[in-house]
Image (cartoon, coloured by chain):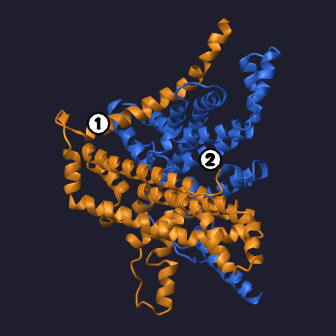
Chain colours: A blue, B orange
Amino acid sequence: MNRHRRHHLALGLIVFLVYVFLIGPLVIIMASSFGEQAALVFPGQGFTLKWYAQVFQMSSFINSALLSIEIAFAATALALLLGVPAAYALNRFRFPGKGAVKTLFLSPVLIPCIVLGFIMLRYVISQWQLPVIPSLLIGHTLLSIPYVMRVITASLSNFDFAIEEAACSLGATRGYSFFRMVLPNIKSGIASACVMAVINSFNNVSLSTFLTAPGVTMLPIEIMGYVEYHFDPTIAALATVMMLVTLGVMLLIEKTLGLQSVV
Amino acid sequence: MKKRGMGRYIFLALIAPGVLFITVFMLIPLFWVILSTFQEGGSFSLNNYISLLDSVYFRQVFGRSVRLSLLSTGLCALLGFPAAYYISRYSRHKGMMMALAIFPMFTSPVIRSFSWMVILGRKGIVNQALVGLGLFARPQSLLYNEFSMTVGFVQLFLPQMILSLLGVMDAIPTDLTEAAGSLGATRLVAFLRIVFPLSVSGLVTGAVLVFTGCMTAYTTPQLLGATDTQVLSTMVYQYAMSLRDWAQASAVAMVMIVVTLAVSTLFNRLSRRINPLAA
């Protein structure tokens, strides 16, 4: 029994260290955002909130954050509009080439993001001359479609289509039965697809890094440009704000859908 | 009768917008890029690939990408296995432990790489400790090299490894190890003969995620690496954005697609085959 407990303890210690490695750096960033020195050091001295004030005064961060949020939500909405009907068709109907269609909807995840960004720059921007903002929307929609496809297909596979047939045989139109029978049943699937797609889009770097124009930059790209030349606690403050939002989102997911459903 | 005929083609209307969107904005550009890599001056040519393979620089970059990705995958397996095993078997706060693994996954990779710039920098906590302990007379350069890139990669992808392993470990019935114990197997034997073999498929799935992730990650090598530690993704970016050399950038992009697709199809198939608990 004693040896048993020692093993247990040793394993626990390893796991503790693994988690220190995972979480520690983020905690250090949070802690160093309150230091008074102009250089980013940990442990910092004193306590100040001036770096937070500075973050909200920097229009480049505010503007790019707003752009990132707008693109993330718009792209997710567009991905739902394209993905939900397709996922429904794939689960509901039999037709030739079904497997190929499913693969097509999941395929954006198979192409490395950095390659997707490059081919969008080369064709959609350089050749087709599309402006940057629509290109960002298109690119981020491509990123979100596989999430929508995967999650909605999974939740539809638990749906009994006999319910829909019953509604139809009682005189409901296809549209009515879809909105009143099918959609309410896959609500939570749609919600978790949205959360994943929005977070993924908001944090994306590899795609957005190719799609910038003067004054049009997504937040992660703006931060990357900033930290190449500056090393002050402003970024730590911004990072802390972003992490607090992430924590809030996670708490919300846990209370509503359960974290298990989004990973 | 008429209504039924329409119903048969309703799926077309439902899938068409998405199919069209993906085809126009991804497949066609991708097809043109692939085609362009096999052309030079309007005729078929393998010159783009030949010059790539001939270049010592490309071979170095490719070798570095593979080496760092393999190393990071190994380290993630080494760190992730005990963590997942502990969470699955012993942890009394499983939800909390999972949330703590998911939190970094949801945090921007820019912030995660930046945190290592703070920690490993000359004034960072690691250098302070090394100098404080008397191991080094003055702060060492721990950043912008393969070491810092590997650290960044491992921290970036470790959660994926832990979650993949948890997926299979949670499916192992506890009766199995208990039965082995009551039949006289030591805990180590039970682990080696039951838990480990049943976890291998999750290990392979996780390894594929980590390896392809490292091979294609851009933020971490860009922030924690330097110009002399380029990897494939930073090379694509440099050729495309700084040098505007579409041909070379496209060829490198093709290499990335082929390697990641080959590795993920091959090993995901293997993972499904060796999972005895999968139906």
Rendered image quadrant of residue A46: bottom right
Q: Position of residue B262 (x, y in %)?
A: 41, 51
The residue where tag 1 is placed is B35
> Could you tell me which chain the residue with mark 2 belongs to?
A
Q: Secondary structure at mark 2?
A: helix
**Looking at this rendering, what residue extends furthest in the front direction?**
B183
Say which residue appears at 57% left-offset and 35% top-offset.
A79
Q: Mark 1 Cα within 10 Å, few/some/many (few <14, many 20+)?
A: few
Count numbered badges in the picture. 2
User: For this view, does B264 lie left or right of residue B171?
Assistant: left
Q: Secondary structure at mark 1?
A: helix
Q: Position of residue B214 (x, y in %)?
A: 45, 59
Q: Which mark is residue A196?
A: 2
**Looking at this rendering, what residue extends furthest in the bottom direction?**
B134
Quick check: A88 above or below A149?
A: above
Say which residue appears at 36% left-offset and 30% top-offset.
A129
Q: Quadrant of the N terminus of chain A?
A: bottom right
> Could you tell me which chain the residue with mark 1 belongs to?
B
User: Amino acid type of disc 1?
Assistant: Leu
Q: Position of residue A203 (x, y in %)?
A: 54, 51
The CA span between labels 1 and 2 is: 34 Å
